[in-house]
Image (cartoon, rainbow, N blue to C red):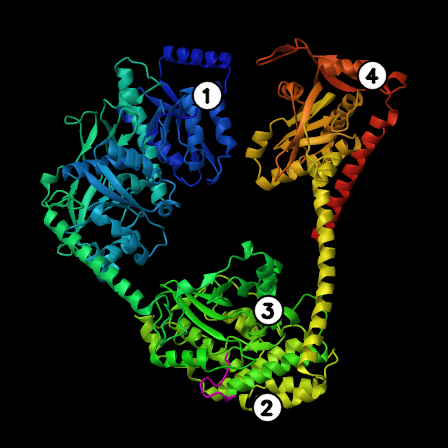
Amino acid sequence: MSSNRPFQAIFGTSQIAFIILLVIIIDIVEAVDIPITILIDETIRNAQAIADLAKQEVLNFAPNVTFTYTLETSASCSTKPSDSKYINEFFQNYYSKNYRITIGPTCLANLIRFGNITAEFQSLEMNILTSYPFNHPTMIDLVTRSPRNLAENVIAIAKSFDWNQVAIAFCKECYSDDILASETYMDVITELLDDNSVTVRTTIDIAKSENRDSIYNKISILPTAARVVLLFLGNSLSDHVEFMAALQSRNYTRKEYLPVIVLSKYTSSYQYPWVTDSSKLDMFDKTVVIYNNYYSGKTNNFLSKLSFTNDDDMTVSFQFYESLWVLGKYLANAEVNSTKFNYVNPEKSLAKEVIEGPFGSIQFTEDGKRLSGYSMLLVTKNSTTGNNIQQLDNVAMQSTSCSSSPCLTFFANGTEYNAIKDIPLCGFNGEVCDQSTVIYSIVAIMAITICIVVLYVMCRKLIRGSKRRNMRNPWLIPVADVLFIDLTNTEGSQHLSIQSLQRKMEEKQQIQKSMVSLKSIATVDNMYCIVDKLMMKERIRFEKGEAAKLMKMKTALQHDNLNPFVGFSLDKATYLYTIWTQCFRGNLADIVLKSKDEFTGMDNNLQGAFVRDILKGLEYLHSNQGLGYHGALTSYNCVIDSHWILKLSGFGVNDFIVKWRKAGLVYTSDGTPVISSTQLHYYAPEIRRTWRVNPDESTTPAPTTPATTAKNEEPNGGLTSAVMRRADMYSFGAVLFEILFNKKIIDLEDSTNDPYRLIDEDHETIVPLYPEIPNDQDVHPDLISLLHRCFNGQPTERPDTSLARKITSSILKMSGSLVDQMMKNMESYTSGLEKMVESRTRQLAVEQERANNLLSQLLPQAVAEELKAGKRISAADYESTTILYSDIVGFTSLCSESEPMEVVELLSGMYEGFDRIITQQSGYKMETIGDAYCVAAGLPVPSITKHVRAVSLIALLQRDFLRHFEIPHRRGQYLKCRWGFNSGKVFSGVIGIRAPRYACFGATVLVAAKMESTGIPDNIQMTLRSQQLLEEYYPRFTVKPRPNGVKVDGVGYFLTYFLTGYEEGTTEADGLEDDEYCGEGPNLLKEYFKNVKEAKQLEKQKNAS
């Protein structure tokens, strides 16, 4: 425990001398009535009755000692030390009534605060709440749960069983709701153990909500760390169930590992988890429990007179009752021995005595910490008692065999329990035993294994050459062949070739958020590819049927309107990559789902070309016996190559991904569902229905091996190819809807709270079963009819691809050859690009204007213009300037008593007024740091004398402003400031490149800061130089000298003046118009406060409405 405590010297020399004189006078007077201040909160309901009872009982054994006490109660404790009532009462009793003893407080928030005060005043404090963490010269600690007492009990037991090396499992948040817990000072407990030769080899941090599976991994370090584990996981045995289960799961038996549960909280009755659940008895069997039972069986008489709400109330009441007994016993002995009670270091006297308290003997260490023995029990399923516990022994007080008196001792020989050793026979790593033969054998085996592996790899390379691809499964791409491209470093023509994906990343459109985070650009065999990424829980195994299907997708499916499938790639057991050929024009969604200011519309030719290509590719898939359907037709899977030919991508792979997700094999890396919510509306209702979790199956246990589940599950949830083809036509209707109306059926955004979902079922429920088709656009009725048929709820009523082609071909006719169509598409795209460039140019102009405005606020206008012109700003000298500093008086204490947002609101309002004044008087705000405010005049635009006039007006106006500026969260209170300024030579320049700042330097700046720091609240202090300039050029400013000047460290004495005001009248020499201060200044303030008042009235009206 650290002995350094931050005491603040808050009193002057004369006050300390007065306190010493009071202590001397008190020591001379014979003590009969002992005045005590008792600080109790309302949760200690029986405080008055306990005090009266103790006072009467003290008179029975110490008639020469009577207590005169003042019992101060407050409301329930809060987390902030804001109870000024306690402090006022303490000081009033201390000075007016000569009270030198305090019992309490019982609020944790005030414990440290009062400990500092009583230590500073050397006033005796009887602590009855929880341990005070620092050394205290006048504190007697009655707490039985202190870190010192807890550690001493553990040390006594550890030494008795020769445990010199232990581990600690600690859950800090398990004690967050227990204000009396000493376990929160675990570093102090660990330090005390180490000081007494009980080494803590490792500390395992456990979270409150952590389950046995997570703990299972954490305790894997025990075999090489420790055999005895001290458990600090809560105040009850039930808090330790998960840890004990983890030990049992790892098969850490009690013959090798011993958990020791430490319970420092006293309770009238313990709950044993194995009583209600007998299966838990095996977990706790042969477990040692060290628990605090000091008051057990000793408080019946006391409890018969009073009742308590909980164990904490009862424990604090016990210690409060004991504190009055300790005072009575000690003062009675001090009176008999004719010795005066010593308020400084009383614990040294108490450490020599054994005080018989109301509940047993009470003893203290030499630093005032109470020592009380705990008890030790053993949980055993062979016990004959009803609760399966065997009481071993109690830790006892022993003073004869200790180097420090007193101390705690536990006699292991007095029990029949044989504890395990803290170190294995051969050491934790076998270092004690000779294992050279084992080591040589392991080295030999490893060398042979390495040789075999190297030989195998070399042979494999010789056989397969540089071609690593498996010819039987060409769709399985080695991850080494997938070369990812970093878009941030790509330039030139390559940069242009991937413009579609990069445009998504730059624009960050809501419609594409979920896709961009899961897609990457790569090259495979010198071919650009688009890569979809999923995470794997374990490596995926492909069955023969799956491999055959993928082989057909790779080699057999060839069509002008199909995007080639490259294959899958498995990055060990981490990533699953789905690879398709990259099309340089992006996808259909890039064109039809643009923002309104960029979308140029599509004519019938372009619409017809896209619809024709979709239906041709879909018709080919539906007629192919190897696949038979697409399965994932969306606008994002309709990609466009450099020749403006639309190709279908993503076909066939959805079956695998759905199957793997249901088996728990894959999930997303960004927390979104595997099937993005932005694309749910493309899938037919009958498909989405198979993806939902069956409520009857949601409670069934997860499969033991996901691979087994994946193997036995039917693809597509048992849907036939015919049903899947009808579902494709529903998807075609959704894509046609977007082509005709340039918007989605519904806009949804992915949530990122569960990466293990197949779909977001909350979003799925709001996707319309039958989309609403707009009737406010000029669309051919036959196309509307086709949409209605595609969205039909009966899959058999939906059209096939041939019928859809007939309808669309007759309506969306395309004239000219294929080359003519390509040229028209290029012209349409070029026109769209021109409009997009115009839109982006307008956005750039707006952003440029914002940047210029921001730069002009950060830097002076002249400096900002030079920076924008690319000129280098050199440091410049200014022969005559004035620098003003201001600082709020008492700002630190105001912040400590205010909420952060209240402080921000206060500074914002004050600086708004200050900035108005500076702008009106042509000053320049250099910087603001917290409540400090710096203003300069005479730079960067130089002036000869006007700078001192400007700063003087600014300071006077700011002072007038603050006299009317009410603290927003403290009505009726106003701020006070100190101002200080100085005139002279400075040099200035721009500091920094990324965040440039205009700053000035020189002795003038330093002296101006000293004028502020040595000033007087609500006064404006200036140097002699500034006063001379005002007197010579602006005599209407009134000043007065400061008596004796001020002393500046490192410089010497300064002759300074206070700026008091401004005299009205006509003086030709000052060059100052009457309305510059007396007119515009007050008018500026009036206008500001008028605006503030109007804003508050509008806010009240808004709240009322």
Q: Are marks 1 and 3 in contact (CB under 8 Å)?
A: no
Residue receiving disc 3: 586
Q: Write the residue at 20% across / 40% down.
A: 165
Q: Report the front residue among 1079 and 157.
A: 1079
The amino acid on which the numbered mark 2 sits, given as a three-letter code, is: Ser
Q: Nearer the viewer, mark 2 or mark 4?
A: 2
- Label 4's element? helix
CA gap between label 1 and label 3 equals 82 Å
Disc number lying in front (3 or 4): 3
Residue at point 61% right, 32% down? 929
State which tag comes first along the sequence, 2 or 3: 3
Say left or right for 704 vs 673.
left
The residue carrying mark 4 is 1033
Q: Residue at x 10, y 40 (%)?
A: 414
Instruction: Say which element carries label 3.
Output: loop
User: Label 2, on which residue?
Assistant: 802
Q: Is residue 596 left or right of residue 408?
A: right
Q: Which residue is mark 1?
A: 94
Q: Amino acid at mark 1?
A: Tyr
Mark found first going from the N terminus, 3 or 4: 3
State the separation of the CA atoms marked 3 and 4: 73 Å
**Residue at the extreme top:** 1044
Q: Are marks 2 and 3 in contact (CB under 8 Å)?
A: no
Near mark 1 (Cα within 10 A), the count class, few <14, some 14-19 or many ≥20, is some
